[in-house]
Amino acid sequence: MTQEQIITPSFLRIQADANLQSMQVGSVMRKVKSRTWKKQRYFRLQDDGTTIWYQSKKTGNAHSTFSISDVEAIREGHQSEVLLSIADEFPPDRCFTVVFRGRRCNLDLVAESAEEAQSWVRGMRKLIENLENMDEKERLDQWITDWFKKADKNGDGRMNFKEVKDLLKMMNVDMNEDHALRLFTMADKSQSGTLEDDEFVLFYKMLTQREEVLRIFQDYSSDGQTLSLCDLEEFLREGQLEQERVQLHAMALIEHYEPSDTAKLRQAMTIDGFQMYLQSSDGSIFKPSMQKLYQDMSQPLCHYFISSSHNTYLMGDQLRGHSSVEAYIRALKRGCRCVEVDCWDGPNGEPIVYHGHTFTSKIFFKDVVSVVGNYAFKTSLYPVILSIENHCSVEQQKTMAQHLTRILGDKLLRNALEGKVSNGLPSPEDLKGKILLKGKKIGGLEGALNGVVEDSLAAEISDEEDSTEIDEENLHNDMIRRRPKKSKQRLSKELSDCVVYCKSVHFNSFKHSRVHSKFYEISSFTESKAKKHMKEAGADFVHHNARQLTRIYPNGIRTDSSNFNPQEMWNAGCQIVALNFQTAGTEMDLNDGLFAQNGRCGYVLKPVFMRSLEERFDPDHPEIRDGYRPVNLTVKVISGQQLPKLNQKEASIVDPLVRVEIHGVPKDQVKQETRHIDNNGFNPMWHETLTFTVHVPELALVRFVVEDHDKTSKNDFIGQYTLPFSCIQQGYRHIHLLSKDGTSIPPSSLFVHIRIKEGT
């Protein structure tokens, strides 16, 4: 009996698809890293239907694999810089790019023929689609299959007790050997001394029995065997703290998650259906209704937080990092709605993009514009702001304007929307499918509409005010000096005309802005200057941001592309809080968490007290505002499931702890953590309750972090999940953990109970 006969989900029947059959036979393709690095590799789909294996065609020694679950998309043709560099050598119909999730580098391939390339493209897309459409049972089946393969070292389709013990270590559980042997013996129905087929499934079910879930199930079950419709309604009211349409919801859950047709006919739910429901999106901590587009999108642009990127072209640090159009693709696909382009004079009259006065690589401005045009609206239809950091001569500015108008066409907003000139900024809904240029502008919006024409403007055409440059002689001594004071340059009318609603202006003071600023003007601040304004006049900053847009970007000293805490800037109502998307960490977790709501469209409506010109909200003193109402949050951390193993050494097992962090106004910044559990990353149990008072829940984010406790050094990160406080579902919920770079790590999760009450 082969491994594939043991547990093979029906959706992976390779025999039914000619492309998958061809992939299973394998192909010789060129793996391309640069114009000069093109090596032949033999690729094939393994029998599990989820893993691609490849090795050197020449030596046949070293080999690698990757899982289809790690693949985000397949791009056909010359859609990467690497493949564009060899466009004269290989036609686009033989080329494709495998795009991985997270921050992993792409894989660029050239097939021997167009037919072979299409077979791989169609086949891999089919496998990705299959994985994305799996239900909870199929995901579990696939997970069991993966573990069986890892444990069955000799590939005979059976597992002896030694292999089972190795499996337990791999699964991050330190189990008593006597207990493991007892489970093994109970599962070995054939008494052969090995587990196969259903025996392995039985062993797995005994191993993964969720006592804490069974206890909840039995607390609400009238007969101890099933939840009747009335039982389930009671659980939804008391356990899940639901109040509306409870009976209809209970009926829908039975229909969707109950695997037994007999139980369905009786309108009942078994423990299997109950556990599948709790582990599903309906049982998730994130309210499903708020994952969809649910907010009013007809407010002025300045009333929204906008997902924004800093130095978007960089894949690495600010000194020697690689500049790439791929960075724009990744940011836009993550829902980013404001990207930055640093423009400098390039060769042969072609503007280039890179981090000026450093050793970062350079890319052409026209290639950036093409990529933005192609990917701007694949994830979200709402407007994209192209923030131009302009260092070009007038001639190359004209070239920039030509590329923008020619490549973007109707997508580029060239004129004010009819009826929107004097009434303030248009809304995301008004600007759907449009790309807005942010930069310096000659004159004002009103002048342009009234036919006032100016030729050019002598100004500081660069927007950022606190940039740094690298002194090449002292680079190795890590010495950084300030860039010489900017000289006035001229702004071309052609580029100026491309700027409509986002005219960059120097900030004078909040008082000056109230009197003189136009609604379409936007000022940029370094993080340190923004903090200074918040400290000195927080309420004025919030009031300013109720009228017009503000952009915040990292201090120039952050040459490692580290990020500042965006929450501080959101507390002041700043809309465009630009982060280095290429740098993983708490800051990007918060950004991803805030913008995970509202259909991941990149726009989140600010709370009403931050949009009103009548209210005076001060983030440092939230208790003085009208309608102030704190809430109490109670989090019972119950258990963890299949936490990832950090150290691959056999004897290494994690000692997990859970930390719950509240990020919000200064009064809400707090964190608490559980004790750590020794040697159990498989099914740790905490049953600990953490309580918080949240003063401004409308601005708060909640971050759940799991770490591996270390007595002698800093704890190691295991996983996290961040979401807006307003999106939390009460009751018994699973939290599906994410890796450091924001990708999912199934089936790792936390099981918690959440309760939210109004405070006093």
Image: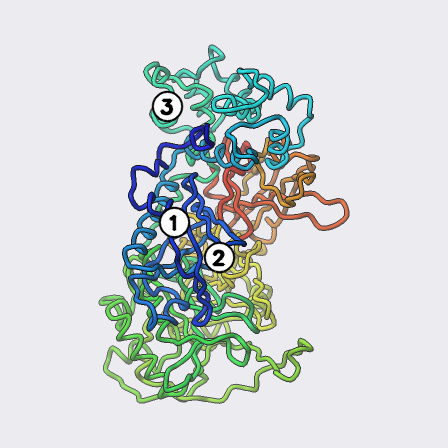
Residue located 42% across and 52% down the image: 43
Whichever of labels 3 and 2 marks the residue nearer the N terminus, that label is: 2
Q: Considering the image in quadrants, where does the C terminus appear?
A: top right
Viewer-side label of 3, 2: 2
Q: Position of residue 478 (x, y in %)?
A: 67, 75
Q: Which residue is the extreme one toward the top?
A: 223
Q: Position of residue 316 (x, y in %)?
A: 53, 66
Q: Which mark is residue 56?
A: 2
**In front: 320, or 397?**
320
At label 2, counting other C-alpha atoms closer than 10 Å, the crowd grade (few under 14, some 14-19, many 20 or more) is some
User: Given contact means CB atoms under 8 Å apart, are the residues at marks 3 and 2 in contact?
Assistant: no
Question: Which amino acid lies under the numbered mark 3 shown in the image of this protein?
Answer: Ile
Q: Position of residue 644 (x, y in %)?
A: 58, 41
Question: Which amino acid lies under the numbered mark 2 shown in the image of this protein?
Answer: Ser
> Residue 668, relative to residue 690: is it above or below?
below
Q: Which residue is the extreme one toward the right?
A: 712
Residues at marks 1 and 2, CA–CA distance in whole angstroms? 13 Å
> Residue 230, relative to residue 315: is it above or below?
above
The quadrant in which residue 207 appears is top right
The quadrant in which residue 160 appears is top right
Question: Which amino acid lies under the numbered mark 1 shown in the image of this protein?
Answer: Gly
Label 3: which residue? 254
Label 1: which residue? 26
Residue located 51% across and 68% down the image: 553
